[in-house]
Image (spheres, rainbow, N blue to C red):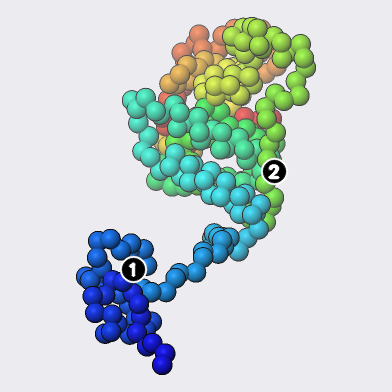
Amino acid sequence: MVNKHCDCPCHRNKDKCPQGGFCCPGYIPADVPNNRFGSPNVCPDTIPTPRYNSPNSSLPIQELNRLQVCIEEINDTLRTIGNPRDPENPEEPQRQRQLQQHFRALRGSLVRVVVTCHDEKVSLLGILEDAGANFILLNTLGEKKLLLFERICLLKHENNDAETFDHQQELLYIDKCLRREITFHFGDIVGRSPELINIFFGIPLHLYMLPFIGCKIAVKTDEEELISGILCEIDENQFRLEVKEEAGEDEVEENEVDPCVEEDGIRTINFAVVCFISINS
């Protein structure tokens, strides 16, 4: 007769232990190893099984990587724009620099920019040519417009289907002699070129406008529609325009002097009230 009871050593009364049953841990003597959780059956050997992470997107890996980079850039830009501007904050120059780099990546794009001007918003359409430390340069049908960052409330691509191109690293293919001069005489070389200053540090608007002294410009301010005049002086916070009536060619040749010497007809304009500045190309 077949023995229908197990011979498990952990039971004191083996006659009451059914074959194939479980050993109760409470009755396991100390000298009996317990590595089966009280089961008389031997566990099968573990079969190595490859593990795969569940995909977090249906996109191919390359497209997903590009999308993640794009999302991170947008988030970084939103953090830069969303934080309130505080000139006393030591991190403000870094935030301005991040915003400049973002706008410079859009160079050559057709964009629509909406700027605040007193109680209204002015919409401008043009090619974004460049961006400085605190302004962008917009080309609108042969006229250049300078817009301060603090006045911009919206900037978007006019053509949503247009491709965006990654700009190459600045100064990647410059002349070897120039590369050597920049390496060994960085301050002297960069300090002489507004373009290099803008690339390495970001040039502010008042320095960018210095070469336009003596040129006619138009300024839209919060108080007035448009002010036209000759740019004759500029500093960090304000600039001065000669808004006298235009003289004849003969009179201009005879009076080639500093236009700001005469106080009559000179307007001093603070950058804080400027909506945008127009300069003929």
Farthest residue in the bottom direction?
A: 1
Specify few, some or many for label 1: CA neighbours under 10 Å numbering under 14, 14-19, or 20 or more: few
Q: Position of residue 69 (x, y in %)?
A: 57, 46
The reply to whether residue 205 is in sight is no
Q: Which of marks 1 and 2 is in front?
A: 1
- Quarter containing the C terminus: top right
- Where on the picture, by quarter, is residue 53? bottom right
User: What's the CA distance linking mark 1 and mark 2?
Assistant: 64 Å
| Residue 206 numbered mark, or none | none
Q: Which residue is drawn at 30% across and 75% down?
A: 23
Q: Earlier in the sequence, mark 1 or mark 2?
A: 1
In-image side of 167 versus 273 (left or right): right
Q: Residue at x 46, y 13 (%)?
A: 263
Farthest residue in the front direction?
A: 1
* Amino acid type assigned to the residue bearing label 1 in the image: Phe
Label 1 element class: loop
* Amino acid type assigned to the residue bearing label 2 in the image: Phe
Q: Residue at x 26, y 85 (%)?
A: 16
Q: Where is residue 80 in the image (x, y as percent from the top left)?
A: 44, 39
- Where on the picture, by quarter, is residue 269? top left
| Residue 165 numbered mark, or none | 2
Q: Where is residue 169 in the image (x, y as percent from the top left)?
A: 68, 30
Q: Above or below — where is 101 with respect to 55?
A: above
Specify few, some or many for label 2: CA neighbours under 10 Å numbering under 14, 14-19, or 20 or more: few
- Quarter containing the N terminus: bottom left
Q: Where is residue 91 in the image (x, y as percent from the top left)?
A: 39, 28
Label 2 element class: loop
Q: Mark 1 points at which residue?
A: 37
Q: Residue at x 59, y 19 (%)?
A: 197
Comparing 178 with 143, the one in front is: 178
Q: Above or below — where is 153 with respect to 149?
A: below
